[in-house]
Structure formats: C-alpha cells, structure tokens
Amino acid sequence: MRPELQAKLLQHLNKKKADGGFTLVELLVVVIIIGILAAIALPSYLNLTASSKQSEARQNLASISHAQQSAYTEGNRWASSFDELAVGVVKGAGTSSASTVYTYTMALVPSTILATTAATAFTQAAPIDDKLKSYVGGTAVFLNNEKQTTWTSGACEAAKAGTPAATVSISAQTGTDVAIVCPANFGVIKVAGK
C-alpha cells in the first residue's frame, strides 16, 4: 500500500478511536448513579401518589356530605343512592359505589338524643389497596329542644394504612347540639357545618 494511503488510513482510524463511545466502566458508573437516584426518589413518589389518592377520598366524602345536606334541606330526607346525590366520580343506583381506588358505602341512621331528633348520613371510604388509609364521614341534622335545626359534619381518617373502615357515631355535646364521633384508631380530619 502506498505510504500516503497508509497515513490517511491511520489518521482515519485514530480519529475514529477518538470519536469512540463510552467505556464499560463509564456506563457502569452511570447506571449505578441512576439506581441510587431512583432508590431515593421512588419512596417519595409512592408516598405522593398515595397522598393524592387519599386526598381524592377526603374530597369525595366532603362532596357527599354537602350533597346529603342539600338533599335533606330540599326534600326533608337523605338521598338514598349515589346517583341521587349526583356527586362526580361516586356513582351508583344503590348505597355502594366503587371507584378505581376506594369503595364508598352509604348508611342512613335516624336517632333520638336527649329527647330530640337527629338524623345522620354516614359514608365509608374503604381503600381497594391496603397501603391507603380508610375514611369515614357523616352529616347530622339535629332538631334541638327549641325546635331549631342544627347541622354538623365531620370526617375521620384512619391512623394508619390497612385499618378497615368503621362507622362513625353521633353524640350529644350539650342539650342543644350533637357532634360526629370518630371510631377507635381514627382521627378527626375535618369538622364543618352548624
């Protein structure tokens, strides 16, 4: 081969080698760094997705509570199905409805407290995934001794994930008012109304 061609071939091979890719060690270091970052970020991401799903349940319970209060105000009775309430993603002709994350169950309870009447609409939000918290909420209308109507609403959140949904209850605070009482292992997350 002619010396000029040999020189050009060597220049071309040297240039190609200089333009070469990553070594195996460099690729291995990059993969390890990506793995460490993923191990740090993944738990935060999973907690964030669980938190957003639980936020959906809290929002749905609040919407159901407001819709039940409106139904009772307009018709002097609780709505008996989720379709009657017409609350966004929670639908169904009966007292049970399932979303992709939670199963919602409605219960209507008439009560007598301190010789006055209280009627309560409860809703449970039981998670489909046991890594999420359960929720339960209630709305109560209370006719006190002076025949005045008082409203109270509340929602309770399970202290930890995997706790089964329970039923809230109502109790008299004074002779003129009632309160939503959370079950054991649940804490109050919202109290509104009156």
Image: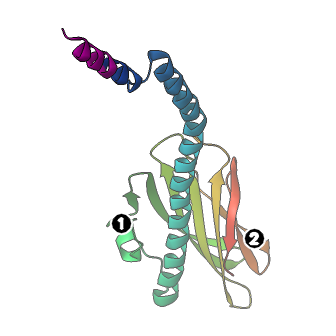
Name the image quarter holding the C terminus. Answer: bottom right
Q: Which residue is drawn at 57% across and 55% down?
A: 135
Q: Does the magenta stretch include residue 7?
A: yes
Q: Is residue 59 magenta?
A: no
- Disc 2 marks which residue? 172
Q: Which of marks 2 and 1 is in front?
A: 1
Q: How many numbered circles are shown?
A: 2
Q: Residue at x 54, y 80 (%)?
A: 69
The x, y position of residue 89, in whole percent, is 39, 66
Amino acid type, label 1 = Lys
The x, y position of residue 34, in whole percent, is 52, 31
Tell me if residue 125 comes above or below residue 71 in the rendering.
above
Q: Which residue is drawn at 56% across and 62% down?
A: 58
Badge 2: residue crowd in 10 Å (few <14, some 14–19, many ≥20):
some
Q: What stretch is highlighted in magenta?
A: 1-12
Q: What element carries label 1?
A: loop
Outermost residue on the right side: it is 174
Amino acid type, label 2 = Ala
Q: Is residue 119 visible?
A: yes
Tell me if residue 19 comes above or below residue 50 in the rendering.
above
Q: Can residue 163 be seen in this view?
A: no
Question: Viewer-proximal residue, 103 or 88?
Answer: 88
Question: Viewer-proximal residue, 89 or 23?
Answer: 23
In which image quadrant can residue 160 be found?
top right
**Marker disc for residue 91:** 1
Q: Is mark 2 on a helix, strand or loop?
A: strand
In which image quadrant can residue 112 be found?
bottom right
**Marker disc for residue 125:** none
Q: Which of marks 2 and 1 is nearer the N terminus?
A: 1
Q: Which residue is drawn at 38% across and 75% down?
A: 86
Question: Viewer-proximal residue, 61 or 120?
Answer: 61
